[in-house]
Structures are given as C-alpha cells and as structure tokens.
Amino acid sequence: MSTSAEAALLHLHQVDPVLATVLDASRPIQPSAHEDIYLALLRAIVSQQISTKAAAAIWRKFESLFAPDGYPEPLAVLALSDEEMRAVGLSRQKAGYLRAIADFAQRDQLDFQHISSLDEEGLTRHLTSIRGVGRWTAQMIQMFALDQPDVFPEGDLGIQNAMRRLYGLEETGRALLTRMTQIAEAWRPYRTLASKYLWRSLDNTPVK
C-alpha cells in the first residue's frame, strides 16, 4: 500500500470511529487507474438505467461500429445515424447524448490538461454542461476515471443506504443530504476513498 493510501486510511480511522469499523472489516481498495474521460462518459451514458449485463452487451455492439479497433472517435460517432444507433440497442435519447459528448470532445473540451486544471465544482459544472450528463455522472467520472481524492456523491442511493444503516440516520430528502454532508466533512480530503468503502460495505456499485 502506498504512503498516500496509508495516510488516507489513518486519517479516516482517526476522524470517524463508525467509518473505522467499515475500514477494518473490508479488504483494501486499490487506487483507480486514470481513464480516457471521453470514453468513460460514453460508457456512462450507455449504462444509464439498465443492468450491467445489458450495458456490456450494448457497448460491445456499439464498439463493433468502429472498425478496425473499436474506438468511437468523435467524428465517427457524430456521423452515425439514429437507425445505426438503434440497431445496437440505443434509444433515440441516448443517441443524442452520445452525440453531445462526441461534439464536446471534438471541440477539445475534454482535453486532459484542461480537465485536470479544474477544481471539483468547476469540473462538475463543465461536464454537466453536456446534454445528458448530470451531477451524479460527473461525480462518477471524477471518482473512477480521474481518481480525484475528495468527491462525495451525496445523491447516490448506495451511499445514502450505507450511511442510513451505519449512522442510524432517519432524515429524508434534503435533510438527509445535509446530515450526510455534515458527517462527510470530517473525511476531507479523502471523501472519495471513504465513499468507496461505504459502497463496499453494501457489496454494492454506484447507484443513481
């Protein structure tokens, strides 16, 4: 385990005894590898509101449209017709969202140097300016594709369920989000890692 990972776990242990019990009961979580943010956004849209198995099948069919290497270059995505998109299992709405991402990338708005210069809220605003990309999707990109250390996805149902159970939270709606955010303040600057352990405590994956 790296020195930075050890420092993060030590901090979380010290500031939150409830979370410490989760950390002690879980196998270590390894840092995420930085990913192609454009590709990660396309995959996120394909995966919205369908099962993991169905998303994987549609993604394979989508990749097959881009010979020879399967990489959906922005111009190639923009050139696809609705009929071609529907043939691989994509709705008209999702096809529109994929084109919006491709257009954004084509205009160099997903350049890594530019993306990495933005803070968390700035990056969230930047990504959610793309049609079809909401705050939750932007946070998942930050946490998994970019491995940013201090993101707290308070709107994720898995995180909400884990914190209700572990902290005995009875609030609902906005009051619940406020209470969760207050608890998570102690985890700074390692809220991403804390959140990944909360998902692990449910044996869950991020759920919008």
Image (tube, rainbow, N blue to C red):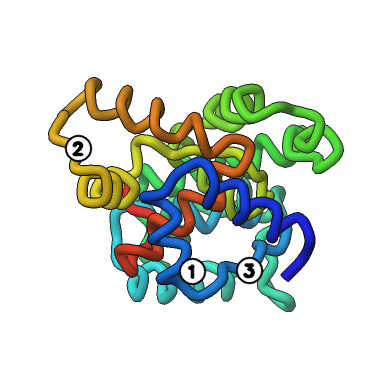
Instruction: Look at 81% across and 43% down and name the residue there.
Output: 112
Numbered badge on residue 59: 1
Q: Disc 2 designates what residue? A: 169
Amino acid type, residue under disc 3 in the picture: Gln
User: Contact, CB < 8 Å: mark 3 with mark 2?
Assistant: no
Q: Nearer the viewer, mark 1 or mark 3?
A: 3
Q: CA distance from mark 3 to mark 2?
A: 29 Å
Q: Which residue is mark 3?
A: 30
Q: Which of disc 3 and disc 1 is earlier in sequence?
A: 3
**Picture coordinates of residue 38, whole percent (x, y):** 67, 49
Asked if residue 157 shows in the view, the reply is no
Label 1, label 2: how far apart the Cα atoms are: 38 Å
Toward the viewer: 49 or 93? 49
Q: Position of residue 167 (x, y in %)?
A: 26, 43
* Viewport quadrant of the N terminus: bottom right
Can residue 107 be seen at all in this image of the molecule? Answer: yes
- Residue at horizontal 19%, vertical 43%? 168
Q: Determine whether the residue tagged by mark 2 lies in a helix, strand or loop.
A: loop
User: Residue at point 63% right, 26% down?
Assistant: 126
Q: Taking 19 as reference, is 67 left or right?
A: right
